[in-house]
Amino acid sequence: MFLHFLHKKEHKEAFIELAHLVAKADGFLHRKEQGYLRAYWDELELSAADYQFDTVRELSEIIGDLQDEQVKNIFLVEILLLTFADGDYNDAEKQITQEMKRLFGYSDEIYETYRDWVIRMDKLKIEGMRLILDPS
């Protein structure tokens, strides 16, 4: 959704690595999460064939050096959207997003603002699908 605002290759690569970490956090890659990952590759204009994520790096290694506030905001919103994609915001995903919150220095209020927006977006997406698929 907002990844097209990422212009630096290192930001794109960090995001896609982070997204894979989050998607696999619960030990299962849900069909909806797979769809998000495919969309991320496309939006970032990266090729999945060029990257391997065999070694799992710590979250702080992936995003700890980010300084740009807009990039941090994009990372958090997109990752929250991913965590809600399969309808199961589990403990592993909560732990990652809470660690992101800490690493980025967000207050509880700012974090909740983003989280609430993502939940509303998810509900609107579901409503839109219902309208399109069953308009009666």
Image (tube, rainbow, N blue to C red):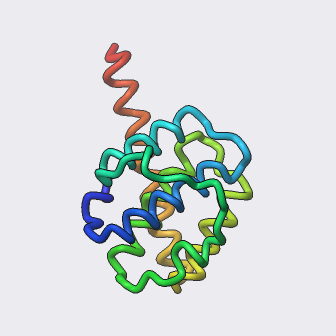
- Compared across the picture, whether 116 is left or right of 71 comes to right
- Compared across the picture, whether 9 is left or right of 17 comes to left
Q: Quadrant of the C terminus?
A: top left
Rendering coords of residue 104 (x, y %): 51, 82
Q: In this view, does 84 lie above or below 30?
A: below
Q: From where the camera sits, is residue 106 visible?
A: no
Residue at x-position 37% and y-position 47%: 47
Rendering coords of residue 84 (x, y %): 55, 48
Residue at x-position 59% and y-position 49%: 23
Please tell me in which quadrant of the rendered image residue 55 appears: bottom right
Q: In this view, does 56 lie above or below 103?
A: above
Rendering coords of residue 82 (x, y %): 51, 50
- Compared across the picture, whether 42 is left or right of 16 comes to left
Number of disc labels: 0
Give the camera-side residue of 52 and 8: 52
Residue at x-position 34% and y-position 32%: 128
Give the camera-side residue of 86 and 126: 86
Please tell me in which quadrant of the rendered image residue 36 appears: top left
Q: In this view, does 85 lie above or below 90?
A: above
Residue at x-position 36% and y-position 73%: 71
Residue extending farthest front:
50
Q: From where the camera sits, is residue 36 visible?
A: yes
Rendering coords of residue 30 (x, y %): 61, 36
